[in-house]
Image (spheres, grey):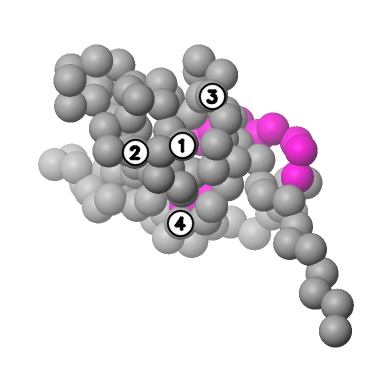
Amino acid sequence: MTDLTTAPETAAPAFGTWQPIEPAPVNTRVHIRTLDGAEFDAVRDFDGEDEGGNAVVAWREADEGTAPECWSDGVCWAVNEDEMRSDPPVSWMPLPPAPEMKP
């Protein structure tokens, strides 16, 4: 089984640099681009294991109403609740750094 709760230690990509979707962090809000070109913030969540013991992850919109309509209740599955293909994420980037708070 793949452990998705811990990530290998690597340098974080810079904001504005698109990354392949596969190494996207789990349980972290990031900006994604879908196959059809939609862009919005989402979180890749660990959803347990399938019958074969493989990790199951799902992308969820971070802000309600921002994902394409083909995502069932803001979640991307290979096939949505209407038996239609969901628009899968293909790349991601970290969010911009938070502005510094000045006293």
CA separation in Å, label 3 and label 1: 9 Å
Viewer can see residue 59: no
At which x and y percent is residue 4? 42, 54
Residue furthest bottom as drawn? 103
- The residue tagged 1 is 66
Viewer can see residue 101: yes
Does 41 sit left or right of 67 as displayed?
right
CA separation in Å, label 4 and label 2: 15 Å
Part of the protein shown in magenta: 15-26
Q: Which residue is located at x 19 percent, y 42 percent?
A: 50
Q: Going from the N terminus, do you reach mark 2 or mark 1 first?
A: 1
Q: Are marks 3 and 2 in contact (CB under 8 Å)?
A: no
CA separation in Å, label 2 and label 1: 8 Å
The mark total stands at 4
Q: Going from the N terminus, do you reach mark 4 or mark 1 first?
A: 4
At which x and y percent is residue 2? 37, 49
Few, some or many residues within 10 Å of mark 4 (<14, 14–19, 20+): some
- The residue tagged 3 is 38
- The residue tagged 4 is 27
- Does the magenta segment cover residue 23? yes
